Image (tube, grey):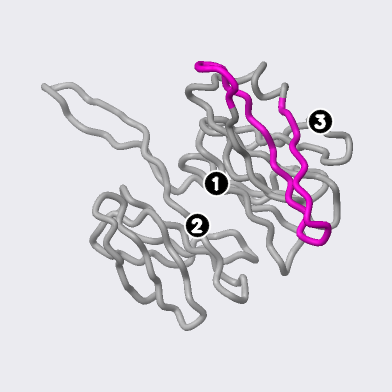
Amino acid sequence: MFVADHSRFVNIVRPLLCVVDHRRATVDLHELPWYTAGYDLGYQALLSPVPVPASDLLLMPIQRDSEPVIYSLTKRRKVGTIKLANRRGNPTLRFRHRASELWADDYDTILRLDVGSWRVHDALRLQEEIVEIVEGSESRSGAFIGEYSFDLDETRCAVARPYGGDVVLLDTATFRQVQRVPIGSEPLHVALLRDGRLIARDWKSGNVIRARA
């Protein structure tokens, strides 16, 4: 499933949800009036939708918004929202395979939620604001975390921190930070291998970074 913008006329945005059924070899197009009526279309793009396992529901995160939409494929409409950390990030949503949990990031915070009730069980802010002195006055600016990923066994979660120049590891059972791995760059994307190797990509240069936890 994916979202596409289709316009018949210039300056008219008509987003469509494209549902591809590989078994039937069909493509079904869903119009999304709730999106065009409720969001800033030039500022808040629809992000990658995530199917809810064993249901007809789809989670649809939206750029710079902390409330992903719950969408029913059967009813073809929005049926609710999920409240994250109110940090107005660009949420990435991932279901764990070994636990009934949904994980999400929201700008500088990572969260885990119960599947079904969509209640936030835990939230951990992993990046503080950047404080600078500009012309004798203190200046504060927001700083976001990068991508997160689980190892194969889902015992640890790696979170890239471009502003920290490191990757932090969380224990998925306790939701606590258990390690910080300095890598001397600005990691934005990260993968954690079973043997403890970290493979990251630098934010600005795109260079591949290798480290070990």
Q: CA distance from mark 2 to mark 3?
A: 30 Å
- Hey, which residue is sitting farthest left in the picture? 135
Q: Give whichever of 188, 138 is nearer the camera.
A: 188
Find out whether residue 79 is within the magenta segment: no
186 left or right of 137?
right
Q: Residue at x 46, y 42 (%)?
A: 108
Q: CA distance from mark 3 to mark 1?
A: 25 Å
**Residue type, mark 2 in image:** Tyr
Q: In which quadrant of the rendered view does residue 119 lie?
A: top right
Number of numbered tags placed on the structure image:
3
Q: Nearer the viewer, mark 3 or mark 1?
A: 3
- Hey, which residue is sitting farthest bottom in the picture? 195
Find out whether residue 26 is within the magenta segment: yes
Q: Of the residues under marks 1 and 2, which one precedes in the sequence?
A: 1
Q: Are marks 3 and 1 in contact (CB under 8 Å)?
A: no
Residue bearing the label numbered 2: 148
Q: Residue at x 51, y 17 (%)?
A: 10
Q: Where, quadrant-wise, is the C terminus in this rendering?
A: bottom left
Assess disc 2: are there few (<14), some (14-19) or many (≥20) residues with their C-alpha within 10 Å of its C-alpha.
Answer: many
**Residue type, mark 1 in image:** Asp
- Hey, which residue is sitting farthest right in the picture? 75
Residue bearing the label numbered 3: 77
Q: Is residue 115 above or below residue 33?
A: below
Q: Of the residues under marks 2 and 3, which one precedes in the sequence?
A: 3
Give the magenta range: 7-32
Q: Nearer the viewer, mark 2 or mark 3?
A: 3
Q: Secondary structure at mark 3?
A: strand
